[in-house]
Image (cartoon, rainbow, N blue to C red):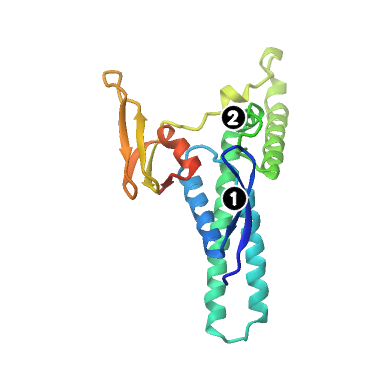
Amino acid sequence: MTEELDLMGQDSDGGSEEVVLTPAELIERLEQAWMNEKFAPDLLESKPEIVECVMEQLDHMEENLRRAKKGDLKVSIHRMEMERIRYVLSSYLRCRLMKIEKFFPHILEKEKTRHEGEPSSLSPEEFAFAKEYMANTETYLKNVALRHMPPNLQKVDFLRSVPKPDLDSYVFLRVKERQENIMVEPETDEQRDYVIDLEEGSQHLIRYKTIAPLVASGAVQLI
């Protein structure tokens, strides 16, 4: 299948930009988003356009298989590829939901303070899920525990009680585009900040918050 698909993205000024991708390029985008989401400690930018296009592509592939001749070896091969794509897509979405459940107050606070034009970490559906999850958690705590406690202890500060994503954790990455003058924070107080260059194709183990902007821009790939 060589037809092209339209994918809406954002240009450098925050406006809409239409990107035309082949099905193979679309699946590659999905796999990159999946790997980054899987290994990043925080919730990354939402990719609803990729998810929607992949689901449309799966429907299109399913329709093509219905019209194919039974017993054709290509049908089995294409069906196996469809199952692989469904697994990657499901794993990507599950990973994001697990992060939302784990860090929901911080994710919602980040969304609340997000500047206009800044990419969102949540799709509209994920935002609704996060708000509902927070409300249900608060209701459960009140019904099970808080109502039995003294009045001054019947409120819970989720931002203080729920751990934040550990941005100081280390991640493996592969460099897709050469990067110069990357500032690296010292490991101990006795050390000083230092600068490194990341060569295209090289692999590194580095603190996540140092390269988080490069993950967002697509300059590096978590592995």
Image quarter (top left, top right, bottom left or bottom right) of the N terminus = bottom right
183 on left or right of 68: left
Q: Which of the two discs, 1 and 2, labels the residue nearer the N terminus?
A: 1
Q: Residues within 10 Å of mark 1 (few under 14, many from 20)?
A: some
Which mark, by number, is residue 218?
Answer: none
Secondary structure of residue under mark 1: helix
Mark 2 — residue? 106
Q: On the image, numbered disc 1 is attached to which residue?
A: 93
Q: Quadrant of residue 190?
A: top left
Residue 172 falls in which quadrant of the image?
top left
Q: Residue 181 in the image: x percent, y percent?
A: 34, 32
Give the camera-side residue of 41 and 203. 203
Determine whether 118 is above or below 154 in the image.
below
Residue pictured at 36% horizontal, 44% vertical: 178
Which residue is at 54% across, 40% downward? 44
Q: Secondary structure at mark 2?
A: helix
Q: Nearer the viewer, residue 113 or 14?
A: 14
Residue 132, image x, y percentages: 72, 37
Residue 18 in picture, x, y percent from top left: 63, 52
Q: Amino acid at mark 1?
A: Leu
Q: Residue at x 63, y 65 (%)?
A: 58
Q: Residue lying furthest top in this view?
A: 152
Give residue 74's position: percent from left, percent from top.
54, 80
**Residue type, label 2:** His
